[in-house]
Image (cartoon, coloured by chain):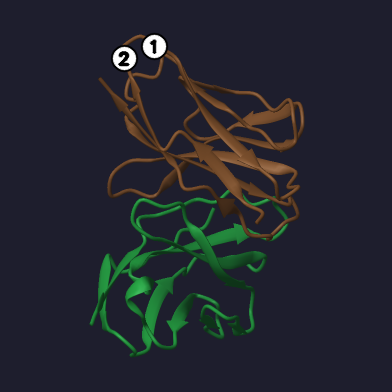
Amino acid sequence: DAKTTQPNSMESNEEEPVHLPCNHSTISGTDYIHWYRQLPSQGPEYVIHGLTSNVNNRMASLAIAEDRKSSTLILHRATLRDAAVYYCILIYGGSQGNLIFGKGTKLSVKP
Amino acid sequence: DGGITQSPKYLFRKEGQNVTLSCEQNLNHDAMYWYRQDPGQGLRLIYYSQIVNDFQKGDIAEGYSVSREKKESFPLTVTSAQKNPTAFYLCASSTGIPNQPQHFGDGTRLSIL
């Protein structure tokens, strides 16, 4: 499975946009980019996923670079409830997709 | 509401004792998973099952066992052979269709007395 690289931690102010980067320079053409987040003492929660085109849902947006070697999860207006560890995961499109979690990015949100 | 229920939330085990963690889902999902998480780390796959009466080992299956007798249930037994069982255990389920998201329970925290 291709690896991803994320910053260990990031800080944001409440109600400001947050851009969480992920590098995946060895991504293959059939790998999907998935994002999950984990709040303290809870199980991970699915956020969004995409292949080539940018994606939007009620939680966030996913911007994928043209060469697909990096992507950015965008939270449009951070709230205190968005403070969590965010994981960027690559999943081979043809597989059932056992998730391989790295250490993720710990996002802190200041009021 | 549909979801995944893990019980108990906290569990204590004596040395040499087997314990079973419960995971139940009412999402009608075919696939179920067990992960282990150690402090400050990501999740690691223990076992997974894509259909009733079938399951496969994940990356760290030694010292663990599972069963999948019913679609909605996937219990995990932590045996005495697991030398370092203290961890946060998470159960998940999915439709089994590629690229569909996994849905997680709130976990069971296991500690050794």
Q: Secondary structure at mark 1?
A: loop
Q: Which residue is at the front of the view, B80 or B71? A: B71
Given the image, on which type of amino acid does mark 1 rest?
A: Gln
Which quarter of the picture shows residue A32? bottom right
Q: Residue at x 41, y 38 (%)?
A: B9
The structure residue drawn at horizontal position 64% and vertical position 83%, both measured from the top left corner, is: A53
> Which chain does brown denote in the image?
B
Q: Are marks 1 and 2 in contact (CB under 8 Å)?
A: yes
Residue B71 locus on image (x, y percent): 75, 36
Inter-mark Cα distance, 1 to 2: 6 Å
Q: Position of residue B93 (x, y in %)?
A: 64, 47
Residue B22 position in % (x across, y down): 55, 31
Q: Which mark is residue B14?
A: 2
Residue identifier under label 1: B17
Circle number at residue B50: none
Q: Amino acid at mark 2?
A: Lys
Front in this rendered view, residue A21 or B92? B92
Chain of the residue on which disc 2 is drawn: B
Total count of labels: 2
Residue B35 % position (x, y): 49, 40
Residue under the point 65% across and 56% down: B1
Q: Is residue B51 left or right of residue A13?
A: right
